[in-house]
């Protein structure tokens, strides 16, 4: 059965005391949401402290990046098994900030996705077009290429153990949210594309929307038939907003 989810992407924000304050507010408020998946994806140095704060709660722990390599001379990188050591269940791969600021190609993203699954982590695979691409009318082509890069390497069945996040680049951190219909159209396109290869996997695939989701627009986005929740950046750092967005999943 398709699961709904809200995941916070803290990006490079927070510190020990702010994280504790945030989670101490969020955890009890979200305790009743037992039918959905909830997670926070935190910076590497805070994995250990957040792991302890999340112990015995319904909030899962995630990281924001991972190496495609198992181990070795890769200075500054963090492996899948290291994330597992700290109780991570999820890892974001292919976030547009990593694709654009750190030149991660779709092929590298696919390798990270495969590495994550091999180590029993659930990849949150981000796809999305830039404003120029949308204006050029090539949104579907871009999404298809990003999805194909992963499916070609990992196989369509691998999506049975993954979560997709559609994140239009022009909506991330800009305050400009895709309209529910704009997001729905791309979500449906992603699901149909997967369905051509495996309709069961497509039906069960959780596809999140990300890009300036707020407490005020979450409900109408999540009401769309192919939008199964959200990947939340800025608003995940504000306890009341993250709580309201999670409750908008309507458990
Ligand atoms: C994100 O970084 O994944 C994101 C969706 O950010 P924001 O919600 O701030 O647009």
Image (cartoon, rainbow, N blue to C red):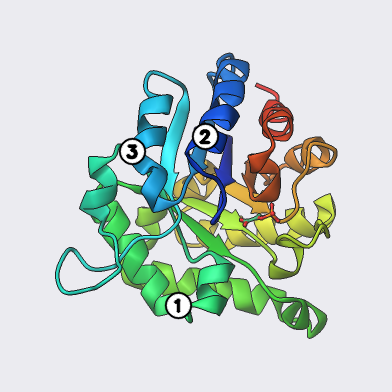
Residue 48 - label: 3
In the image shown, does 152 or 10 lie closer to the viewer?
A: 10
Q: Earlier in the sequence, mark 1 or mark 2?
A: 2
3 and 1 marks in contact (CB < 8 Å)? no
* Along the viewing direction, whichever of 228 and 244 lies nearer the viewer: 244
Q: Quadrant of residue 250?
A: top right
Query: Which residue occupies 68% across, 45% down?
Result: 227
Q: Is residue 3 visible?
A: no
| Element on which disc 1 rests | loop
Ligand 1 quadrant assignment: bottom right
Task: Examine the rendered structure and indicate whether residue 196 appears above or below residue 210.
Answer: below
Q: Look at the numbered discs 1 and 2 and tell me whether their residues touch, using CB distance below 8 Å.
A: no
Secondary element type, mark 3: helix
Counting from the top left corner in percent of width and height, residue 235 is at 70, 43
The circle drawn on residue 104 is 1
Label 3 within 8 A of ligand 1 by Cβ: no
- Residue at (16% x, 74% y) in the render: 73
Residue 183 lies left or right of residue 2; in this view the side is right
Residue receiving disc 2: 17
Q: Residues within 10 Å of mark 1 (few under 14, many from 20)?
A: some
Q: CA distance from mark 1 to mark 2?
A: 32 Å
Label 2 SS:
helix
């Amino acid at each position: 059965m398709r699961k709904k989810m809200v995941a916070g992407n803290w990006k490079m924000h927070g510190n020990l005391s702010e994280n504790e304050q945030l989670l101490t507010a969020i955890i009890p408020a979200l305790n009743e949401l037992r039918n959905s998946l909830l997670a926070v994806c935190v910076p590497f140095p805070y994995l250990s402290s957040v792991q302890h704060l999340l112990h015995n709660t319904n909030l899962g722990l995630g990281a924001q990046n991972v190496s495609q390599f198992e181990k070795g001379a890769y200075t500054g990188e963090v492996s899948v098994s290291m994330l597992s050591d700290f109780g991570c269940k999820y890892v974001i791969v292919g976030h547009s900030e990593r694709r654009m600021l750190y030149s991660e190609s779709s092929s590298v993203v696919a390798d990270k996705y495969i590495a994550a699954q091999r180590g029993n982590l659930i990849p949150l695979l981000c796809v999305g077009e830039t404003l120029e691409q949308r204006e050029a009318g090539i949104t579907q082509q871009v999404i298809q290429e990003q999805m194909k890069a992963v499916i070609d390497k990992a196989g369509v069945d691998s999506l049975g153990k993954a979560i997709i996040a559609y994140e239009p680049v022009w909506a991330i951190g800009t305050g400009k949210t895709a309209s529910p219909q704009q997001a729905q159209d791309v979500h449906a396109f992603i699901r149909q594309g997967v369905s051509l290869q495996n309709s069961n996997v497509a039906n069960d695939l959780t596809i999140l929307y990300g890009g300036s989701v707020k407490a005020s627009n979450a409900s109408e986005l999540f009401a769309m038939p192919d939008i199964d929740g959200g990947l939340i950046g800025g608003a995940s750092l504000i306890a009341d907003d993250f709580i309201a967005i999670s409750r908008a999943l309507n458990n």
